[in-house]
Image: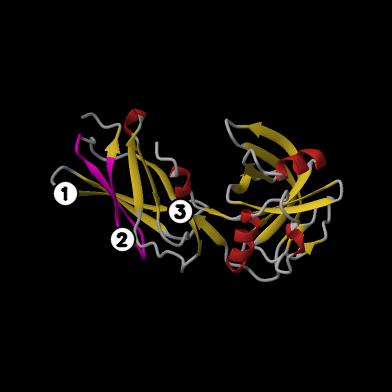
Amino acid sequence: MTSDLWKKLTSTVGLVCTRHDGVTNVMSAEWAFFVNKQPLYAAVVLGPRSATRKLIEGSGEFSVTLCAEDQAEIADFAGSHSLTDIDKTAGEPIRLGEPDATATPWVKGGVAAVECLLRRTVDLPVHTMYIGEVVAEHVPDRPRRPLVKHGAMYGLGDPLVRTAVVATAELRPGGVLRVAATAPAHDSTRTWRVTLLDTDGAPTPLGSHPSSAHGDLLVDIEPPCAVEPGYRVRVETQGAKPGFSAISGAAR
């Protein structure tokens, strides 16, 4: 396995802040992410030489700031020097905010920052994952664009424009055909047209169907004819290219 395969991961750079016994530290962690919605949990994964590990274990808390794209220099600095070398928090670009629910400050200027109470420590073969429950959040007045790590650091470009339906179809017990699909711009008011295509491409309309509450399609249809091996489904909706699918579960 290639030694730098882990660099293929894409994530938002996190600035992990800790305070214990009068010592405050900030470090960069590209493995920083949310791991549970309700309650909201955040996790950071730290290497064996990280001085932050002892501070988290000693205080039982930490904060994470998800970096904005104009914090690339801070992320580089905080990841290049250790607490054992120097106090990094004195640097002027690193602006610390006062905590609301813990004793640990957080770095201002990011996409969002959270204060966490340590709930679980997971020992991995080399690294250690620290999982904390979010007990306070700090969100800027206006949205910030995230700093993205994928080997190097990047800013986000324009949102991708999706143009096509993606569909799948499955023949279920009793001959019922289940069809699922998504399309650009989720819209709970849109309708979907489903068509059965035989091996020659001849169409059999299977009706129009409403969207789910999330704007997607998930419907069970009783086809008017037997579904033979090699049959396909076409799904159409307004404003998107049609989607096609083979039918799983059909005899081959």
Most extreme residue toward the bottom, as rendered? Answer: 142
Question: With respect to residue 228, does 238 lie above or below?
Answer: below
- Between disc 1 and disc 2, whose residue precedes? 1
Task: Tell me if 36 is positioned left or right of 246 in this view.
Answer: right
| Outermost front residue | 85
Location of mark 1 (residue): 202
Q: Which quadrant does the C terminus fall into?
A: top left
* Image location of residue 227, percent across then percent down: 24, 36
Whole-percent x, y for residue 195 in the image? 27, 50
Label 3 crowd bin: few (<14), some (14–19), many (20+), radius 10 Å: many
Question: Looking at the picture, which amino acid does disc 1 mark?
Answer: Ala
Q: Amino acid at mark 3?
A: Ser
* Secondary structure beneath label 1: loop
Q: Nearer the viewer, mark 1 or mark 2?
A: 2
Magenta range is 229-246
Which residue position holds label 3? 211
Quadrant (top left/top right/bottom left/bottom right) for the N terminus: top left
* Along the line of sight, the residue nearer the viewer: 248 or 223: 248
Residue drawn at x 71%, y 52% as measured from the top left: 85
Count neighbours of disc 2 (C-alpha within 10 A) and say few if under 14, some if 14 to 19, many if 20 or more.
some
The residue under label 2 is 241
CA gap between label 3 and label 2 equals 17 Å
Secondary structure beneath dot 3 equals: loop
Q: Is residue 100 left or right of residue 120?
A: right
What amino acid is at disc 2?
Lys
Q: Secondary structure at mark 2?
A: loop
Residue located at (60% from left, 37% from top): 127
In this rendering, the label closer to the viewer, 3 or 2 = 2
Count of numbered circles in the view: 3
